[in-house]
Structure formats: C-alpha cells, structure tokens
Amino acid sequence: MHLNLKTAGVAAAMLLFGVTLAVAAQAYDPMRAVQGQPAATPESGPAVAPNPDFENLPDTAGVEETYYMCSGCHSTAIIKQQSISDARWDYLWDWMIEEQGMAKPDEETKQAILAYLKEHFSSER
C-alpha cells in the first residue's frame, strides 16, 4: 500500500485525535477521589458526634440547614453514603436546582450547606 503525503497527514491527524480523546477520558473526573491523598481514618482526627435530631448527621455548623434542605426530597442515608469531590458537590447542587426542582436558597444558606457537605462527605478530606 502506498501512502501519499495527504493520506499520511490525515492518518497522523486521526492518531493525534485518538490520543487526545484517550487523554481527555483520563482527565479530571469529579466522581473520583483525589489521587495521592490518604483515606480518612478514625485516628486522623476527633470524631464528630452524630445529632439524633437530624437523623444522626454529624453535629457541626450547617447540620440543621443541610437536614431541612436535603431531607425534603431524599433520605439522609444518601448524603451519608457519599464520598465525592468538592467539585462534584458543587455540580450536584446546580443539578438538583436545575434538573430536579430543588428550591434555590439564599447564598448564605447555600454556602453553609455546601461547606457542611464538603467537610463531612468529601473524598478530599
């Protein structure tokens, strides 16, 4: 088979495009845990007491706002099972408002809830 320069150029471009797609597929994924960070262990810090009034969510600042905002649509078990990146929490917040009809709270409440979720249910801590 004989390749001319035009055919060789197209083949090279297709190869480069394929490599670019493969690299992009391995790029940032907010659902993956942060690489190179140790997993949290009980020894890594003081345990946070659960709050029985809010289905045993960790009892720190933001628990009440988080409980009332989130449990109106789903169980707190969904929150507790998460271990996603901070960026994924931001994405899910927007998705729940735009696609799921979640009421949009004021900015202060939004920040309190996202800080709470990221503190207790992030793969980055």
Image: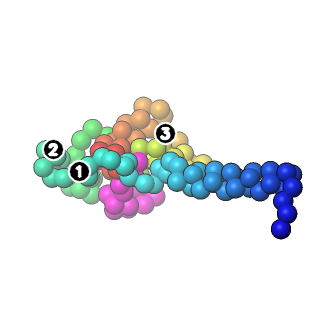
Tag 2, which secondary structure?
A: loop
Tell me which label, 2 or 1, sits earlier in the chain.
Answer: 1
Q: Residue furthest bottom?
A: 1
Residue behind mark 3: 105
Q: Is residue 68 above or below residue 62?
A: below
Residue that appears at 27% across and 57% down:
55
User: Left of 9 or right of it: where is 72?
Assistant: left
Q: Image quadrant of residue 61? A: top left
Do the residues bearing badges 2 and 1 touch, measured as CB atoms within 8 Å?
yes
Tell whether position 95 is magenta. Answer: no
Residue 121 relative to residue 88: left or right: left
Which residue is labeled 2 in the image? 45
Q: Is residue 75 in the magenta section?
A: yes
- Looking at the image, residue 58 lies above or below residue 80: above
For the residues marked 2 and 1, what is the alpha-carbon distance in whole angstroms? 9 Å
Q: Quadrant of the C terminus?
A: top left
Residue 43 location in percent, x, y? Answer: 12, 49
Amino acid residing under circle 3: Pro
Q: Position of residue 44 (x, y in %)?
A: 16, 46
Type of amino acid at the residue the image marks with label 1: Ala
Q: Residue furthest front?
A: 2
Question: Which mark is in front, 3 or 1?
Answer: 1
Q: Provide residue 57's location: percent of width, then percent of height.
A: 26, 52
Q: CA distance from mark 2 to mark 3?
A: 32 Å
Q: Which residue is mark 1?
A: 40
The residue stretch that appears in magenta: 71-85
Residue, x 84% and y 59% (percent of image)? 3
Can residue 55 be seen from the camera position used here? yes
Colour logic = rainbow
* Secondary structure found at label 3: loop
The quadrant the N terminus occupies is bottom right
Camera-side residue of 80 and 107: 80
